[in-house]
Image (spheres, grey):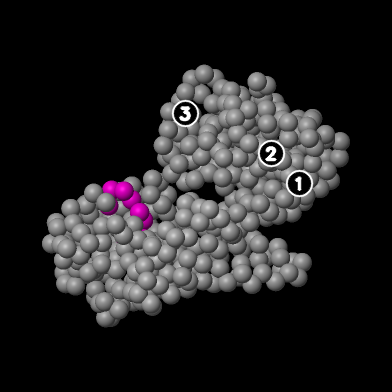
Amino acid sequence: MKKYTIAVVGLWHLGEIFSAGLADLGHTVIGIDSDKKIVANFQKGIPPLAERGLADLIKKNTDKKRLSFSAKLEELKNCDIVWLAFDTPVTKHDEVDLKPIWDFFKLAIPLFKQNSLIAISSQIPVGSCQKIQKFINEKRPKLAFDLAYVPENLQLGQAVKSFFEPKKIVVGAAKKTVIKKIEEIFAPLHTVILPMKIASAELSKHALNSFLATSLSFIYDIADVAKAYGADIVEVTRALRSDERIGQKAYLDASIGFSGGTLARDLRILLKKADEVQIDLPVISGVFKKNKVRRDLAVKYLTEHLGSLQGKKIAVFGFTYKSGTATLRRALALEIIPKLLTAGAIVRVHDPMADPEEVKKALSVKFFANPYNCAKDCHAVMIITNWLEFKKLNLKKLKLCLKSPFLFFDTRNFFYDQEKSIRRVGFTYIGIGH
């Protein structure tokens, strides 16, 4: 196996996984970030975002001298491959901010080694690589380099597993020699490499996330019809997934909306890029709007059972973006809870992994480490994040903590199979679409 010297630039979630992962594949990797505090923590074996198995992976490869970290861009001079792994910032309006990427290139272009490969996995709009290539050529005409776009497909909370067990790796490149080099880098993974044009690779990321978002928007519509006619959306979903043209892993989970910024980011990019060339995308536009109004279901459903929410106490279980991670960035709770507060509700929060101080900084709510204390004297428990820990709750004990009408609002149908048990102990169960 051919081994390379690789600089992974940007050491947040994407960069922490790629730097440790590429080193574990046998390459010599230096993780680079302008934030000296982040670099210092990496040198102590502490990544910015916790992921299962990541700390051990970092220690293993730093001990073997395959992985190191630096805040100095000058390290690029010694690297065969420069891998951009910035987690592209997303604004509150779901638009990407490419400033960190352009700032990097302005400083880094003079440092690139001749005949180096610049691989990009950061989330960027279609057409960006063409602009980057042009920019490098203008700033350093005599530099011989290649460019590749390798869209990331990491799952927060399972990112290490996602890196080492990919179903495929999409590679956008103009030359077969570049495709071959990427194949050599990932050879130990024994996975399928899908070569294509750079623009196709960029667009494939937008298309994938937009397809997933469209699937969710579709099932939200069907869930509303199911509720109106006394059907059960979970049963309908089972029928859909049993069709081989759809499949068991289809994104068909009815809820009060998707979050995180990732899906919305790619919807927004597609709408913007299509608008630039006067193309109308009514389906994508509809998905974006559907998810936005979906947030209002929380107040609507609670009001149907509690009347006015003024002074009503709601225990929200689950505050992080998803189970298995402590990150709060673009979490659904951050969009739902303000709506409850505006309606006059008193909101209390419990989460197995969220940092209490971060919760307090994000919203003016009281955080409880103990779920039963959180639920004490509340009128409703509302499940937002599907933590497995919630399945282990003592339902009788939880019900005794609440006030009438003892609402159990399951916003993701996470407790669908336990609905009878929940009702049996005296809860009023509310699901989505059934």
- What is the distance, in whole Å, between disc 2 and disc 1 at their CAs? 14 Å
Q: Is residue 66 magenta?
A: no
Judged by depth in the image, the label closer to the viewer, 2 or 1, is 1
Instruction: Give neighbour class at mark 1: few <14, some 14-19, many 20+ (Cα, 10 Å).
Output: some
> Magenta segment, which residues?
383-390
Foreground label between 3 and 1: 1
Q: Residues within 10 Å of mark 2 (few under 14, many from 20)?
A: many
Q: Residue at x 78, y 35 (%)?
A: 176
Q: Earlier in the sequence, mark 2 or mark 1?
A: 2
Q: Which residue is mark 3?
A: 57
Q: Which residue is mark 1?
A: 197
Whether residue 52 is situated above or below residue 100 in the rendered picture: above
Q: Is residue 131 above or below residue 412?
A: above
- Residue 231, percent across and down? 37, 71
Q: Is residue 110 above or below residue 64?
A: below
Q: Above or below — where is 4 with respect to 323?
A: above
